[in-house]
Image (tube, grey):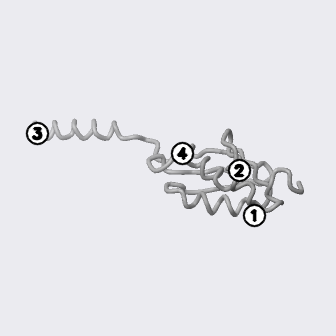
Amino acid sequence: MLSAIIICFTQVMYSQQPTAKFNTVEIHTSMQCDMCKERVEKKLYKVKGVVSVNVNIPTKIVQITFKTKQTNIENIREAISSQGYDADHIPANKQAYDGLPDCCKKDGGH
């Protein structure tokens, strides 16, 4: 009898565990060059929970895999914005954007 209760309790506990521990998202950015890529990658790897970052400069898309219990897509967008780049609907932080080299600005040399 006791073993049947333990088995039933164990099945209920495991069935309530969240299945999605990781999430992968694509964020459209305003990055222009390899310096942008390096700057954004360095910042994103400092965000707790970010597991991998893949930047595609020609498409201006950043693919990020992260632990869902440690961060979320909005925190990641804010981290990109804080470096001076647009991140989907979040505009670049103006002060950070103003401090970017000209080649990294949307209207600078490209």
Left or right: 2 as drawn, with respect to 46: left
Instruction: Point out residue 12 in the picture as x, y percentages from the top left corner.
Output: 27, 35
Q: The residue under label 4 is which amino acid type?
A: Asn
Given contact means CB atoms under 8 Å apart, are the residues at marks 3 and 4 in contact? no
Of callouts 1 and 4, the N-terminal one: 4
Front of the two marks 3 and 4: 4
Instruction: Point out residue 104 in the picture as x, y percentages from the top left corner.
Output: 79, 58
Q: Nearer the viewer, residue 72 or 98?
A: 98
Query: Which residue appears at 83% of the width and 60% of the height?
Result: 103
Name the secondary structure under disc 1: helix
How far apart are the alpha carbons under marks 4 and 2?
A: 29 Å
Residue 8 sits in which quadrant? top left
Q: Nearer the viewer, residue 11 or 62?
A: 62
Of callouts 3 and 2, the N-terminal one: 3
Residue ID for mark 3: 2
Q: The residue under label 2 is which amino acid type?
A: Lys
Name the secondary structure under disc 2: helix
Residue ID for mark 2: 94
Instruction: Point out residue 108 in the picture as x, y percentages from the top left corner.
Output: 86, 55
Name the secondary structure under disc 4: strand
Given contact means CB atoms under 8 Å apart, are the residues at marks 4 and 2 in contact? no
How far apart are the alpha carbons under marks 1 and 2?
A: 18 Å
Q: Nearer the viewer, residue 76 or 15?
A: 76
Alpha-carbon neighbours of circle 1 within 10 Å: few (<14), some, or many (≥20)?
some
Instruction: Point out residue 95 in the picture as x, y percentages from the top left corner.
Output: 69, 54
Q: The residue under label 1 is which amino acid type?
A: Met
Q: Which mark is residue 23?
A: 4
Q: Nearer the viewer, residue 68 or 14?
A: 68
Of callouts 1 and 2, the N-terminal one: 1
